[in-house]
Amino acid sequence: MATTARPVSQRKSQFLIAARQPGPALQAMNIQPLAYAAIEQALRNSPDIDIVDSVGPRQVLDTMSTSSNAAPGVLVARMTEQKAGILHQQAQGRLVVERDQHLVLHDSRQFQPALVTPVVPTSGPMFNVAISVLAPDGSPVPNADVYVFGAMLPATASTDANGQATLSLFGETAGSISALYIKPRCDYWSYYQRSPDLSPDDMNVVTLRPIANWPALPNFPGQACYGWGQKAMRLDQLPQNYRGQGVRVAIIDSGAATTHLDLKSIHAGFDIINKKTNPQGWTEDSLGHGSHCAGIIAGSDAAFGIRGFAPDAEIHACKLFPGGQISQLIDALEYCIDQQIDVVNLSLGGADVSEALEQQIVRARRAGVACIVAAGNSGGPVQYPASSPNVLAVSAIGKLNEFPADSYHTETLTPFVDVNGFFAAKFSCYGPQIGVCAPGVAIVSSVPSNNFAVWDGTSMAAPHVTGLAALVLAHHPDFQGPYKARSAERVERLFQIIKLSARPINVGDPTRTGLGLPDTLAAVGLQPMAGQAAGMLPMALSFGLAPGFW
């Protein structure tokens, strides 16, 4: 019990403070951007503002800037919303003052149930159900997440060492249960059953399908295989010596488990979250998300698992999750500029556009760093930073018959299906900013410590294109000649080649698939472009695609 009284007030939040870069509005008013040193000194002199970090360019003057007074970095400070508003007003448009947003990863592992009633029963009937999750040989599957959905609030539990979980739902009966979903941690397909016949009196048994028994993955994982996504993009037809040599790829994500045989060739990285205490912590991936993306891009073991697009590329794992914020993403992009990274995979996003981040993305592009970004999984408009005109946004597609009929992947289906069985994924964001689409449903890849999992998400689609981009930079003649030097023009040419290589996915809505599915052989210059290039630009414009789409 509290013994003292204190008035409730607004707590401090974290904000980004940066000089707004010169633009037409400031130039018209003959207003010069503020100097970084002056901004920092003014903030430090304010007793109710706490500076906690400085991110972005390290040098005193930003050589990419058009003004010697332009701010070389971004200050991260804690203050109240009220103070931030006052600061913004006093700067008269010369400062960017914005909340340091938390970022999210764009995979759809988190099950999104139908809307449930807001009523929370506290008494009345309770439905108790016991679930046993087994492998085909009868052995238990521990640590699988079990979800039971009814008319009210869902229940969830994880299986114990015996593969069993018991769940209790208030106000439900056997007849009101609407769905059962089981999400294994690794090595098995998920299970999903609408209107399941569950008994409260017996042990309800579910037998999961091992990934290793899937017909499309012969001898998996003991023999390196191509996933359906790699085959759809014709990676399996590429000469074996095309492996992305000499290209640097950064995966800004949750780290990479170098304990995995497919990821053992990754030797570089940076833990942005713990940069002051453990900058080498990037090899620890508690979420598995970064490892999954890394396997798609660069899975490298010749006799094990899934073959990545560019196994000989130099991979840098930048750890931003769990807990990543815009400020730390700015810092990660600065690492990419410093390390002369060629391609960055961003399977992440935020709720709102960030001007401070956009300035860093532009700076990275000028330095020759190409950002390939997942569109988002909300099923709505493209999320930021995929919506930026300075990146390549990737949406997700699936393909019929590439997953078991009783897996949760069936819930990603939409009516948008083309003649080849490709469909626009239900969760994928869409809009005029989409450059291309890529496989993002039922994607098998590496997870810690040396296992495999099947996930959905635009998070899984973007690495397919990132891996392809590494191959293009390493092997397309343009990047050994006129576009060899690092520049914004080099990035634009890379994006253009990927788009021109794409084969249309005709689902009736180009805002869901952009120019289509990139083709590996065409993109690296071994075969002519798909043939539609000349006709696609007018068609894209007729659908109102955004400026900068091409």
Image (tube, helix red, strand yellow):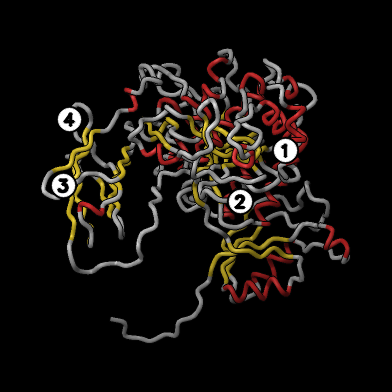
Q: Amino acid at mark 1?
A: Ala
Badge 4 density bin: few <14, some 14–19, many ≥20, Cα 10 Å: few
Which mark is in front, 2 or 1? 1
Q: Which residue is mark 4?
A: 138
Q: Residue at x 41, y 41 (%)?
A: 411
Which mark is in front, 3 or 2? 3
Residue placed farthest to the left in the image?
201
Is the residue under label 2 in contact with that under label 4 (CB below 8 Å)?
no
Badge 3 density bin: few <14, some 14–19, many ≥20, Cα 10 Å: some
Along the viewing direction, whichever of 69 and 485 lies nearer the viewer: 485
Q: Which residue is mark 3?
A: 199
Please tell me whether residue 108 is drawn above or below residue 406 in the rendered image.
below
Please tell me whether residue 95 is drawn above or below residue 413 in the rendered image.
below
Secondary structure under the numbered disc 1 in the rendered image: helix
Q: Quadrant of residue 410?
A: top left
Q: What whole-number distance in Å separates the C-alpha atoms at marks 3 and 1?
A: 54 Å
Secondary structure under the numbered disc 3 in the rendered image: loop
Q: Amino acid at mark 4?
A: Gly
Q: Which residue is mark 1?
A: 540
Q: Residue at x 77, y 62 (%)?
A: 35
Marked residue nearer the N-terminal end (3 or 2) = 3
Secondary structure under the numbered disc 2 in the rendered image: loop
Q: Which residue is mark 2?
A: 384
Q: Amino acid at mark 3?
A: Ser
Q: What whole-number distance in Å separates the C-alpha atoms at marks 3 and 2?
A: 45 Å
